[in-house]
Amino acid sequence: MSGPQCCSSPPTLDAASGAGHVENLAGFNTYVSGSLQSKLAVLLVSDVFGYEAPNLRKLADKVAAAGFYVVVPDFFYGDPYFSDKPDRPLTAWIKDHEPVKGFEDAKPIIDALKSKGVSSIGAAGFCWGAKVVVELSKVALIQAVVMLHPSFVTVDDIKGLKVPIAILGAEIDKMSPPELVEQFGEILKANEVDSFVKIFPKCSHGWTVRYDANDPTAAACANEAHKDMLDWFTKYAK
């Protein structure tokens, strides 16, 4: 996951953004939006810029408005990646924040949700977070998964999936180029896993959470992906 594309268009982090609130969940600072009364939850796992990204929190609020209890944990322990720090390149930051650690950290989050009466959980991962949710799906800890402009995810990962998955990729993406995303889709078909694979034309890696809200075209592309994600959870996380 090295390279500039993964870190292009970094968000301005804002701890006060969003209509929800931050609370402690299983020992993690977690942005929470929505009501537990629905008994349906969605776990959003961020890209390298972390859980304070305003567009990510707006998306959490949007999913919550559709009837889900949404949680966005800080799996970076207050240490998101900052691309303007040349003394700590992404490769060094990743060594401190391997996705496999995110997978292990997600387990107590899921346990905490179930202890609150949640009966079904969907999980979406963005870039770094995609690897986390794929690992969760291999052991069927969740009911549905969505990957958006994934990084780190391999063909072998896809072969191990056990739950319905939607993969939303970008036409302009060195991290998961269209041909790799299409290969993922062929594997899922052969393994008879319910799946939805879509390549967004003219979009770049990170477009679903790092878009400029003042750019109508960029916002429309992001909203289309958000709708696809929400439709998937509505269908399978129930």
Image (cartoon, helix red, strand yellow):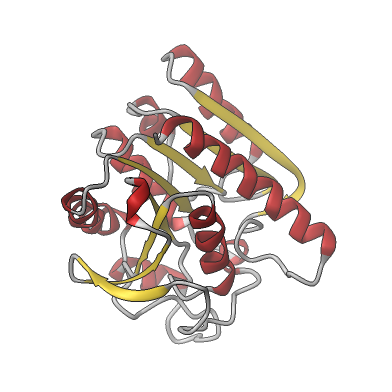
The image quarter containing residue 76 is bottom left
Q: Using the image as rendered, state which of residue 69 and residue 215 is in the foreground.
A: 69
Residue at 30% of width from left, 42% of height from top?
135
Say left or right for 58 vs 72.
right
Q: Is residue 61 above or below residue 77?
A: above
Residue 55: where, in percent of width, then height?
59, 68
Residue 117: where, in percent of width, then height?
22, 48
The number of callouts visible is 0
Residue 109: where, in percent of width, then height?
23, 57
Residue at 39% of width from left, 48% of height from top?
131
Q: Is residue 156 above or below residue 29?
A: above
The image quarter containing residue 216 is bottom right
The image quarter containing residue 229 is top right
Q: Using the image as rendered, state which of residue 124 and residue 138 is in the foreground.
A: 124
Quarter of the image with the C terminus is top left
Q: Is residue 106 above or below residue 54?
A: above
Residue 147: where, in percent of width, then height?
49, 44
Q: Is residue 132 above or below residue 209?
A: above
Residue at 63% of width from left, 56% of height from top?
208
Q: Using the image as rendered, state which of residue 98 and residue 139 is in the foreground.
A: 139
Say left or right for 171 vs 191.
right
Residue at 43% of width from left, 50% of height from top?
68
Furthest residue to the front?
Answer: 37
